[in-house]
Amino acid sequence: MNAAPFAKLTESMIRHRGVLGAMVVGLDDGLIVDSTLQIGVNGNAFAALTASLYRKARRSAKAAGFGDTTFFELTAEQGRVCAAGGQELALVVVCESRVNVGMLRVELLRAAEQLP
């Protein structure tokens, strides 16, 4: 098996202007399965926290009768965290505020179709 099974997904995300890192994260445990990160990005913290937020967003959407969560975005003063996922894994992207979220969202959703 390939040592980095999702390298193409993470590398395609990191090519977007303003993207600082991309990770495939286990939704149950928040552990990084694969990643492409710029220096200075604390991947482990982002992975664990984003997996937790994604699980909560998924539960909230289902409780509201909206169905499955397809895209998650957290916007803060100095950046964004975006995620899209399958049932077991999520593709998480850490970005600067200036990132083109529309384009990134399309790419994230397309890439997430490849996740279990």
Image (cartoon, rainbow, N blue to C red):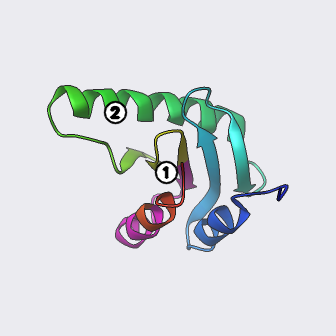
Residue 41 shows in this picture: no
Is disc 1 placed on a helix, strand or loop? Answer: strand
Residue drawn at point x = 17 percent, y = 39 percent: 66
Tell me which residue sits at (52%, 33%) in the image. 51
Ranked by sequence position, the earlier of labels 2 and 1 is 2
The span shown in magenta is: 91-108
Magenta-drawn stretch contains 55: no
Q: Nearer the viewer, mark 2 or mark 1?
A: 2
Q: Looking at the picture, which amino acid does disc 1 mark?
A: Gly
Residue 78 versus residue 1: which sits nearer the camera? 1
Where in the figure is residue 13, as x and y percent of width and height? 58, 67
- What is the x, y in percent for residue 63? 20, 25
Quadrant location, the N terminus: bottom right
Q: Is residue 70 above or below residue 57?
A: below
Q: Furthest-left residue in view?
A: 65
Where 99 falls versus 82 (above or below)? below
What is the residue that sits farthest to the front in this orientation? 1
Location of residue 21 (image quadrant):
bottom right
Question: Residue 52 location, x and y as percent?
Answer: 49, 27
Locate residue 88 relative to residue 109 in the image: left or right. Answer: right
Q: Which residue is depicted at the point 52% across and 58% down?
A: 96
Query: Residue visible at 46% across and 48% down?
Result: 85
Distance from label 2 to label 1 (Cα)? 19 Å
Residue 98: in magenta span: yes
Asked whether residue 35 appears in the rendered view, the answer is yes
The residue tagged 1 is 79
Q: Disc 2 residue type?
A: Ala
**Who is closer to the viewer here, 53 or 87?**
87
Q: Which residue is mark 2?
A: 57
Pointer 1 local density, CA inside 10 Å: few below 14, some 14–19, many at least 20: some
Q: Residue 12: which numbered mark, if any?
A: none
